[in-house]
Image (cartoon, rainbow, N blue to C red):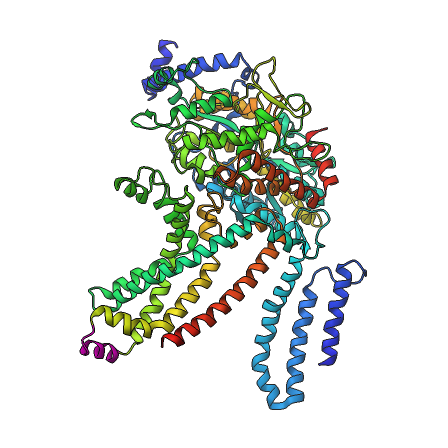
Amino acid sequence: MRVSLFNQLMRAGASRRDVLKGAAGMAALSAASGVGLGALTRPAFAADDLRAQILQVPGVGKGQPTDADFQKVGEMCLGATKASVKQGEFAGVELTFMGLNNQNLHNVLYRGFLKAWEDYTGAKFTWIDLAQADYGARLQQSIATGTVDFDVIEMGAPFEGDVCGKGLASEMPDWVKKQIEMDDLVNYLKPPVGTWDGKQYRVTVDGDAHNFNYRTDVFSDKGLADAWKAAGNATPWGVPTTWQQVQAVTKFLKGQKFNGQDVYGYLDAPKAWGGFGFYFLGSRATAYAKHPDDKAWLFDADTMKPRINNPAWVRAIQDVIDALPFEPADQINADPNTTGFSQFLAGTGSMIPWWGDIGSNAKTNDSSVIGDTVGFSILPGSDDVYNSKTGKWDTLASGPNFSPNCAYLGWGVYVMARVDSDEKKKKAAWSAAAHLGGKDLSLWCAAYPSGFQPYRNSHFNIPEWVAAGYDEAFITSYLKSEADSYNHPNAAIEPRIPGIFQYYSAAEDILANTFAGKMKAQEGADAIAAAWEKLTDQLGRENQIKLYKASLGV
Amino acid sequence: MAVATLGLLAIIAVQILYKTEVDTIGFETWRPVVYAYMLWGVAIGIGQVLTRGEDGQRALFLLPALLFTIAMVIFPTLFGFYIALTDWNLSSITGRKFNGLDNFWQMLADPYYRNALFNMVLYVLAVLVEYAIAFGLALLLNAQIRARKFFRVVFLMPLMLSPVAVSWMVGKSIMEYRFGPAATLARYLGWENPAFFSDPITARISIMVLDAWTFIPFMMIMLLAGLQAMSREVLEAARVDGATPWQTFWQVTFPLMLPVSVTAVILRIIFKLKLADIIITVTSGGPGGATDSVSSFIYREYRDRSNVGYGTMLAMAYLVIIVVFVTWLLKFANRFVRNVN
């Protein structure tokens, strides 16, 4: 760094530490740019002023955003709406929005984002807020009883079979596709995701994959490194890159001290969470179960025969059973919400898989204490991978098998078909959806606690994040883990089949018994397989096979 | 009345034929049938007055409640029994299908349901402990102690709280393993790993304690009312006859309080049989089903798995079990009170 630049920064109030961190970050960026992220970075231009401005609301490290910030961002991003809608054009239109209120996010933000939109267009929204665990049931009941009482819904791609497949959603007009710049979506979220029978329904507002979050301070600690070596481990102390290593590290850390406190390794989430908890077993299993030569990993594509009781999944279940005694004493009662927000962000545990929320909350959530000590990667791999076609474990010539779990495929905003009969209402609903899925607004959502992760190619422009106040090394690590998960050639893609959460929920109950020691891993897996077979028959096997194949692209 | 009845039956028949796709004429929703039922009720009322005079006018006092009960209790219960005999998964493309007693046989073989029923037995037995504590508190608040009114209000406060709020405030905050005050106190007292919801027995006891904390005030207030209504002369006579405090309690107070006690215990058992919200919020039935109640299991079956037919069968079977059990309990309690007195 030039001395003149250093002095200028010091005069501007930056501390010596900040400057050094920035310099180190730039060095890290330079290195990263050369190995993959380079293609995703570009310099910020004057035309990006709006994006730079919204990222300063409130500014990373300046406290958690409030409703005033949501409203301000919503107002600043209203340009596209003003270009397509006249002021007061939707006066008298009343719309209902159904979505989540987890962690005071999702709908809570949307209210603020839509405030300026409502003021400008004259339309009014009423809100149906749901907890995550209540969401699926509420939606299924509305569909089955013909009581769809909402015009716009925040919904995950796994439900597209239930909603779009039954003709309940409104097809996206072309002007919306243009406004939200759909080509900017990362590849794995492009059609067929968001479509049904070739029609586009979804305004994507989120990208979902489980990445691997770890504590950099724990894995760079000399005391732990010495203890690791003294315990007879030949490999150097560092961040695990395979599940075998995760297990070894978790067992090693039990009883160790770090900064004077007990330190723990991996945190499992064994408690049921309305079906969503199953994703966390999935993240442990994909490296074992998702073979690069086979797109299927949860069911056999031709028969819907469950693979949950094959040796790969049973190994993942056994890993949880083996690891739990080395995790915090009450871990059996931890759901993903606990592991992510009550434990990891609060400083307990040194490794968890989660959606990208950990990264977007680590530095911006008031309850986080790990902002400066967290790193990210794709999910660990496995030294061997199970081949369902041969029934044998393969060791790949390329090294460990990696398979990021693209769990849930992100949230989208969908407009319901019930508005189609009223052109004014239909345009209003789609305009609101387009506003929420706008390119600039989405950047803000990715950068601050919102419940949504990066999902557009334009989200991976690191200088924008750094300008917002993110530490460069941190954000490079975070975005690389997300991009590498989305773009991985062996990613495990969520099946978009009706009733998928019923499969997960049935598994959760049986897994709870298995993790509590009432069943062996294989017995539990067999019981899940039996329950899934029954469920497939109940839902209609032929139809499920057809939709599963479609979701896999086979 | 006959015309109104025939009209109502005709509308119901048309709508059933339409909904079962036997006929093409019918209403999009069932709302017209509800309106027809209300009109039928009005016609029945008018008919009663016209045909039975003053007796008919008297019947008018009863008729609205009767029609309401039929619409809101009897019909839904019968409809529930019908749903229990169907295979109805909300995600199924084929919709609802009648499947006879399949759900019933499945229920008999369901280890999760049996486990939940077993847990309910333990939860119900815990009511006896709650009763003992509630009686002790009631005696305390009935005695001449300082700030008696203040304590009465304070002891009642848990009852005013929603069980969900209790779950979060106590189960997930005060009893939280890392930072919870209860866990900190337990560590201070020598419990190395104070995890209240990890071990099956501890978790079950913890749920019982949480539930008891909420509902002991309910029993306490009933018992306190009973104690205050008790004749003081009887107690004074016991003292004059030289009875010790224990003898006074055991041979005078307790027998005289039996009717109130039985009422309090039975009402509390009925509340207990519905135990769900604390379990759903704190443990989701875990670890390994150790804390699962029938209601929390049905909740998962119905809500998370959208398995409406089977979930309804579980609920209906539980309803029958409760009705039989409470009927037996009332008879047993009556006989017990008669024998003691």
Q: Is residue A235 magenta?
A: no
Q: Is residue B142 left or right of residue B282?
A: left
Q: Residue furthest right?
A: B23
Quarter of the image where one finds residue A251: top left
Residue A475 visible somewhere in the drawing: no
Looking at the figure, which quarter contains the N terminus of chain B? bottom right
Image location (x, y in percent) of residue A56 = 44, 30
> Majority secondary structure of the magenta segment?
helix
Q: Is residue B19 left or right of residue A184?
A: right
Is residue B37 or residue A69 the one in the foreground? B37
Is residue A387 or residue B145 the one in the foreground? A387
Q: Is residue B241 magenta?
A: yes
Quarter of the image where one finds residue A252: top left
In the image, is residue B221 above or below residue A442?
below
In the image, is residue B31 above or below residue A424?
below
Magenta region, residue range: B232-243
Q: Is residue B70 left or right of residue A109?
A: right
| Residue at 57% in and 46% down | B304
In the image, is residue A389 above or below residue B107?
above
Image location (x, y in percent) of residue A99 = 55, 44
Image location (x, y in percent) of residue A114 = 54, 42
Residue B99 visible somewhere in the drawing: yes
Q: How many marks?
A: 0
Is residue A330 or residue B101 the one in the foreground? B101
Looking at the figure, which quarter contains the C terminus of chain B? bottom left
| Residue at 61% in and 74% down | B67
